[in-house]
Image (tube, helix red, strand yellow):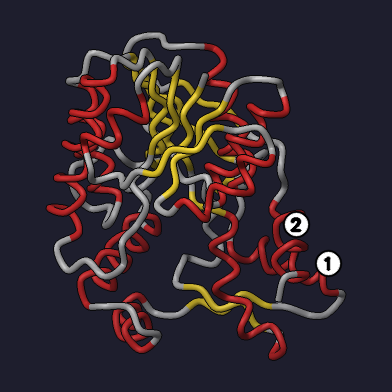
Amino acid sequence: MFVVAGASGNTGKVVAETLLGQGRGVRVLVRAAAKGEAWKARGAEVAVAELDDAVALGKALAGAEGAYLLLPPRFESTSVRADNGRRAQVLARAIDASGVKHVVFLSSVGAQHASGGGPIGSVHDAEATLSATRADVTFLRAAYFMENWGGSLFALDQGVLPTFLTADRAIPMVATHDIGTTAARLLLEGGQGKRVVELAGPREYSPREVAAALARVTKRDVAAQQGPEEAIVGALQGAGMNAEWAGLFAELIHGVNVGHVDWEPGRARVRGSTDVEAVLAQLVAAR
């Protein structure tokens, strides 16, 4: 049986669906019982537990062959790295208390760096914390989510794809569906000590290439419009993000633009099959 956190989100949902589709036992972690009803109907067990409750989480992990865990962002936090550090310690205590054999933890490309990656600093810390547990842990370092482009579709009617990423710089990107199916595959493979697996889509894409793909999807002209990095914090705060998170995302974007947030040489690397155009088509259809 496998435990899956984040089953209400994009990646955890796919992990759970993939495992259930292969006839494997699944226990989904939810924050409220009502969110588990649909999973019960599909044959999954349901455990109600907060990811910062070590006792409840340990009970939910007990008896599991493997678990998919992550640190979902909490955008109300004003001390993100410290808060996530405490949450990672909770995960570690629950893992050791439960005796779960193998954990696949959602990390990020660039997590090899202690600084310069904005919110990625939290998963850098979590990798260190979970490496001290008794379980085998696979750190799945995912690239930039293709679904992040959904936040730029507000300007589609003007034929513009706004971005703060360097327009002509191709970077690793991955669909959340591929993250979920890869995590499920890694769980089924079983633990291999402490290891890192880096994941991206079938190829790298620049924002200009993303705009071209969006033009094909919508059958209209779309151009990437690169904004200056110094405008990032103001734009994000204007959209309602607090100063802490806005600063972290500004650091992240700069890290991507200068190549700091990228593959780690010598690490295992796999690619998903979902092209950015397929994800853009889904995002456009959901508008």
Quadrant hosting residue 129 = top left
Say what amino acid the circle numbered 1 marks: Arg
On the image, numbered disc 1 is attached to which residue?
216
Instruction: Check the picture and name the quadrant holding the C terminus.
Output: bottom right
Query: What residue appears at the point 68 percent right and 41 percent down from the top-left corner?
Result: 41
Taking the image as shown, residue 170 lies to the left or right of residue 285, namely left
Disc 1 is placed on an element classified as helix
Give the percent coordinates (x, y) of residue 49: 34, 43
Q: Is residue 33 above or below residue 163?
A: above
Disc 2 is placed on an element classified as helix
Quadrant hosting residue 149 = bottom right
Q: Is residue 73 above or below residue 139?
A: below
**In the image as oriented, which residue stretches furthest toward the right?**
219
Give the percent coordinates (x, y) of residue 4: 48, 34
Query: What residue appears at the point 60 percent right and 69 percent down from the top-left corner?
Result: 150
Taking the image as shown, residue 241 lies to the left or right of residue 124, namely right
Q: CA distance from mark 2 to mark 1?
A: 8 Å
Give the percent coordinates (x, y) of residue 57: 30, 35
Which residue is at the front of the view, 240 or 40?
Answer: 40
> In the rendered structure, which disc, 2 or 1, sits on the residue that comes first in sequence?
1
Query: What residue appears at the point 43 percent right and 26 percent down from the top-left corner?
Result: 67
Disc 2 vs disc 1: Cβ atoms closer than 8 Å?
yes
Say what amino acid the circle numbered 2 marks: Glu
Taking the image as shown, residue 8 lies to the left or right of residue 138, namely right
- Which dot marks residue 277? 2
Query: What residue appears at the point 18 percent right and 28 percent down from the top-left corner?
Result: 93
Which residue is at the front of the view, 273 or 103?
Answer: 103
Q: Residues within 10 Å of mark 1 (few under 14, many from 20)?
A: some
